[in-house]
Image: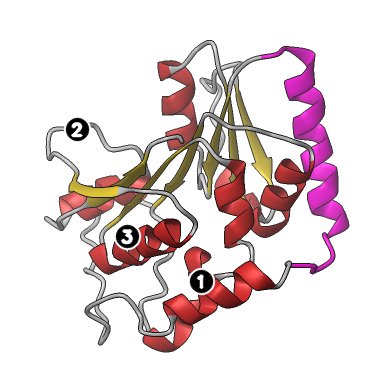
Amino acid sequence: MGDSPSRQVTSTQTAPHDDLERQLLRHAQTPFAKPIAAYNREAFDVAAARLESIERPLILDSGCGTGDSSRLLAYHYPDHWVVGIDRSADRLSRQRADTPANCLLIRADLIDFWRLAHGHGWKPIQHHLLYPNPEPKPRHLKRRFHAHPVFPTFVALGGRIESRSNWRVYLEELAQALAFHGRASRIEPIPADEPPMTLFERKYRASGQPLWRLISDAL
């Protein structure tokens, strides 16, 4: 993906979805029991074995795409493990030779990986969810991570949470969902002079779009 202009998110939804609170309550009351796919379990086992070989603090980069953000985090935190997870084999195949030794890029579905990580007691000190697909059509609310049954597991993993988007409504909903689970957060604009973390961020900036980040500090 190059730096060609990108269209802004358009949606008939201009505020958090009216049905979000009902979805949050429903998922909090009903454990998510979908079977975990074998390939996701195998991918998790690979990551777990690597992390156990050298004990370090953990940073998760969920939906890492080509891994640019994971590499950036690994360079910035050389004494940490950075695990980037993405379900696209094509995006992850663009790994570069300059990937730091403390950066591990894994192909897996986040829905399964988060549950496996939580079940094995992983406690990331930071969890990044950078530019997830906002699914802006109101009827697609359930496709957004914060309205998915796995969201309580995402929260339970803990750590400092950071998410970024070019659609502020998505982050407003995420803030509402975190508050439902007892976590405060704040939304702020991303300074124009701050280096981009992902290819998406670079592309959105090239189009002159305003960008925001949500930060929820570790409890």
- Residue range in magenta is 32-55
Q: Position of residue 56 (x, y in %)?
A: 63, 15
Picture residue at 39% right of the left edge, 68% below the top: 134
> Disc 1 marks which residue?
147
In the foreground, 158 or 97: 158
Q: Which mark is residue 194?
A: 2
Is 44 within the magenta?
A: yes
Q: Which mark is residue 212?
A: none
**Residue 2 seen in render:** no
Residue 16 sits in which quadrant?
A: bottom left
> Disc 3 marks which residue?
171
Q: Amino acid at mark 3?
A: Leu
Task: Please give the count of numbered marks on the rendered protein.
Answer: 3
Q: Relative to 46, does residue 35 appear above or below in the rendering? A: below
| Sequence-first tag of 1 and 3 | 1
Q: Position of residue 210 (x, y in %)?
A: 15, 56
Q: What separation in Å lies between label 1 and label 2 (alpha carbons)?
A: 30 Å
